[in-house]
Amino acid sequence: MKEHIKIACPLDCFDGCSLIASVVDGRVVSIRGDRNHPLTKGVCCNKGMDIAKRQYHPERIVSPRKKTHGRWEDISWDDALYEITEKLTAIKNQYGSPAVMHFSYSGYGGLIKSVDEMFFNYFGGVTVPHGSLCRRAGLSAQNYDFGMAKWHDPSDIIHSKTIIIWGKNPAFTSIHLVQYIKQAKKNGAQVVLIDPLTTATAKLADVHISLKPGTDGALALGMASEIMKNNMTDSHYIKKHVLGFQRFKHYAKDFNTDRVENITGITKDNIQWLAKTYSQNSPSCIILGYGLQRYRNGGNTIRAIDALAAVTGNIGKSGAGVNYGNRTLSRYVSGELAKSYPYAANRRTFIVSKLGEFLETVNNPPVKCIFVTRANPLVQVPNINRTLKAFQTIDFKIVIDMFMTDTAKYADLVLPCTSILEEEDIIFNTMFSPYINFSNKVLEAPEGVLSEYELFSKLADCLELRNYPRIGAKEYLKRAIEPLSEAFHVSYNDLKDTSFSIPENKIPWKDGHFFTPSGKYELFSETALKDGQSPIPVFIDPEGQSNEFTLRLLTPHWKDSLHSQHFAFTDERPKVHISEITMKNNHLKNGEPAKVSSKQGNLIVTVECDNNIEDNIIMIYQGWWHKSGSVNVLTDDCLSDMGEMAAYNECFCKIEAC
């Protein structure tokens, strides 16, 4: 007998797919896209389909493991819970709860596993990361400009006449967006790609404009200067809805085409053409990627691009907008997690990309225990060599995961966990998809595997956390969506049967009321000024090369993996993509090994001649595990200008034959 059960993809991905698991005799035999979902429409990428492979992989952890004298041994859950309870109690009594670090990130996108954060809040508050490895520079920028980041409904893109895809590769990272771009082209839209890399998305574009990495903000300011100089602005929109236009205009006027050509490498004619096309062939839509804010000027870059929409009136109308993130749904999810925050009185934070530095220097109290959930920091954070060395000095390290990740290998105790197929969950993202998806339980967990929800409930009992809610997992989910239910009269059972999207999200800012202090779009932001930022978007020169390290490293996502999850079971060496000229200048041969070096470390790679890469740039996909070679042995832990965001792209290297 075959069953088809609806689930949702838990990956930290733009598209938030609804999926169908096909089950025969209690075993999942395939995963496919849900044809009835308004966004997915039956299409699913390899990452989603691999859920079934991971479910039954022979290396999956199915019992607690303890490291004793350098060797792993299986232990019982009773023993694991006893040891964790004893350690946490002793540390809290001697040093206080901040001596425990909880490191959790984006390894799983569902609500049910947020129970980990709730547990540590009731524990009294621990040391937790803030800032971002991913996109917070851009979110901070759009908070200053709009008051919140919002995406237009995906289907609205078909009404655009001009689409600028800026620093994004949806052909790899958001395949359901591609269908709308193609439809817009059929409707006559002109599609422009702005990217220093000639990605797979270049095939979708009518025009590809390549610029020097990190100079996107200068290009945006140059376009704005041309638009304002030639009276191609929307003066009515500016007068009614924009704060700080004259101050921005005064700054941007210095970004003439000669200056911007020198900074970006883009010809004056192309700068002028971009300005005219964007402002005159409207409605114009900008779709932003994350790579362009992973520089030390990243937040101001996003603000400069946002400004283009403000001065041309491409906000609040169909086919327009600057689409970066979508925080709308998160406003309507709360529940028991929100109620736990007042109990985290001793909560301490550190900048996530500076994990190694923090562990080296923290005192009063020092970190005595690290508890890792939903994350693989020893692959994903920058400056891995420094971080790994500091991580190993911590007395007691616990990791929850389905597999023995690189982080788990350096732990003292590793605990198994359930997969998306083994529990009910509600999943949504704050990126491209506007839908909230229900995921049904398909299978029972393997014998010996506890869900995180059950684990933390047991730990709460062992530690006698008096105020911890003793409710079931289903009730936890129901309470989480109570604000959504009250606002839109959608119940838990409704979510099981329908794909829900918030109506207000179709065309953001249509009513002209922004979530900023002034209620207007803020080209001049007092909030930014109070935060120590420039009140208007400015251009900051990206990091420059040194005499020794002359090649800028870019580390985008690969099409078949997200973060590090799909590189677990390969011994393949990472490839470095370089142009033929760069290859010859460094005396390399295609297909042969080479050593890439930075100030932080070295990485052995295989040379791949790729003339889609500009000269003096090297590109290595992120996510490789240590046995292959993590690209983050090369990256520095420097920060972007806002959002305490990892500036991965501010890394320069050299390359030589092995």
Image: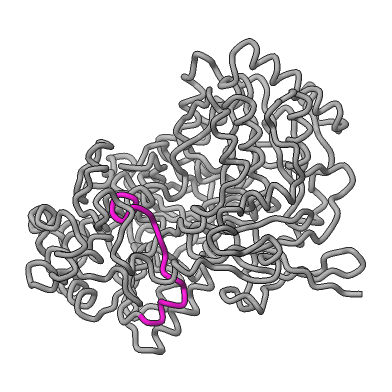
* Quadrant location, the N terminus: bottom right
Q: Is residue 581 above or below residue 348?
A: below
Q: Position of residue 235 (x, y in %)?
A: 13, 70
Q: Is residue 155 magenta?
A: yes
Q: Measured from the top left, where is residue 33 in percent x and y?
A: 67, 73
Q: Quick check: 289 left or right of 541?
A: right
Give the answer, above or below, for where 503 lies relative to 120: below
Q: Which residue is at the front of the view, 219 or 600?
A: 219
Describe residue 173's horizontal placement relative to residue 643 as left or right: right
Residue at 34 percent of width and 62 percent of height: 196
Left or right, 194 with respect to 383, comes to: left
Query: Is any atom of residue 265 visible in this view?
Result: no
Q: Quadrant of residue 528?
A: top left
Reply above or below: 335 against 215.
Answer: above
Magenta residues span 142-159
The type of colouring in the image is one colour
The picture places residue 261, in percent across and down from the top left corner, at 16, 62
Direction top: furthest residue: 94
What is the total number of numbered labels drawn onto the structure image?
0
Magenta segment's dominant SS is: helix
Counting from the top left corner in percent of width and height, residue 67 is at 77, 27
Tell me which residue sits at (72%, 49%) in the image.
475
User: Residue at point 49% right, 15% down?
Assistant: 363
Is residue 588 at least partly visible in the picture? yes
Does residue 205 appear left or right of residue 245 in this picture?
right
Answer whether residue 244 is magenta in the image.
Answer: no
Tell me what residue is drawn at x 18 percent, y 55 percent.
Answer: 243
**Of 108 and 474, the residue lying toward us:** 474
Using the image as rendered, state which of residue 99 and residue 54 is in the foreground: 99
